[in-house]
Image (tube, rainbow, N blue to C red):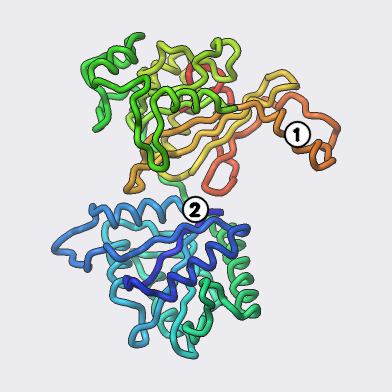
Amino acid sequence: MKFVGIVGSNADQSYNRLLLKFIQRHFKIKCELEILEIKDVPLFNQDDDQSDSFSLRYLNNKIIRADGVIIATPEHNHTITPALKSTLEWLSYKLHPLENKPVMIVGASYYDQGTSRAQVHLRKILEAPGVNAYTLPGNEFLLGRAKEAFDNNGDITNQGTIDFLGSCLDNFIKYVEVVSQLKKPKPIEPEDLYCTKPIATTIQGVDPDDPDWLDKAANLVNAVEGDTYVKLDNGLLTVDQINMFLNAMPFELTYSDDNNQFLYYNNKHQEPNTMLGKRVREQVGNRLATVHDSLPAGRMKNVEWVVGSLRNGNEEYVRTVVPGTPPEIINTHNYQAMYYPDGSFAGINEIIFNFKPWLDWYLQMTGQHLVGGKVGPVAPSSDATSGASATVAGADVSADATSGASTH
């Protein structure tokens, strides 16, 4: 389950940031927690609309895609900080990411009472029209005497406090599961699978459906290749090394951008007929409508559903098993949303692999076996699994993965 934690202070030194980092580290088995800062959020002023600023777009996109939100609030003059109040004003003005979003409140304070009064005020704000969050009732975690509560490693020293925090988190996870049933996904608009609206990275001057698009587009932008070095976030590799690295992956990988243009696949040395998701070089650069033009009209709508669900943030991923494969193959496809630095949708990466050898290895290593003995062919009615946390999606996308380059 994926949560975001909001530090309710813009101070460089904050015990509430320390509290969220402790939750992130100590309870990582229970949930995945990403910590968000409000330091760069401008003071709320509706006469100077900052809704499109990077800091607010980032918060909005991260909160929308999370299963739940944990807010760690200090207490200043018996209430929350001006920075947190201003942030919540922006997030209930034109942006409304907290609407119907499960929220848990925690807080650390210098004094004995923790942040009790600030938490009461924060609950009222979160329930206000325009915010409309689902705040976890009860379960007040009030960490008093914060200076003495943590050791030099940032760990809470009192085991009883840790146990209570864990029980509150367990209750929040259960609360999220219940509230998620009330979630209404954003309606999916018709997807532009024909790439009619170029984006900043779209290479223009070459027809996307040109079978020689890759070479022509590369020449047009003077793309580097061979032993030219590319500086990555956490590495320095040549283009040849990057190709070797990606082609050595035990998966088939694809990428389509947020303009629905199919831009990459690995395993170039494989014959198309030996691949689980058949692709050819001539498809690189194609519009997704062209990649899937052999599909019946109904199946093309499934492609739109996958792309639209990931674009909207209704789902973080879509997973499916392709039916009708031999017993020794479990043809598994994972479609994962990718994001720009501001958290907005940047396209989809797809991982395709035969899950059967991984399953067999795990069963052998653990001495277990499947109920019924062995893995047989997957039933054609198999649904897609999707979401920030695993849920069953209502669309049949499973058969799409067998056609064209991918089911993006």
Mark number displayed over residue 156: none
Camera-side residue of 199 and 145: 145
Q: Which residue is mark 1?
A: 361
The span from disc 2 to disc 1 (Cα, nearest Å) is 38 Å
Q: Which residue is mark 2?
A: 183
Where the N terminus falls, by quadrant? bottom right
Mark 2 belongs to which amino acid? Lys
Query: Which quadrant would residue 17 be assigned to in this image?
Result: bottom left
Q: Earlier in the sequence, mark 2 or mark 1?
A: 2
Report x, y in % for residue 380.
Answer: 67, 25
Is 210 placed left or right of 100 in the picture?
left
Report x, y in % for residue 227.
Answer: 37, 22
Q: For numbered disc 2, what is the local secondary structure? A: loop
Residue at the image point whose x is 32% and y is 30% from the top: 259
Camera-side residue of 172 and 109: 109
Residue at the image point whose x is 31% and y is 16% from the top: 208
Is 115 placed left or right of 356 in the picture?
left
Camera-side residue of 311 and 356: 356
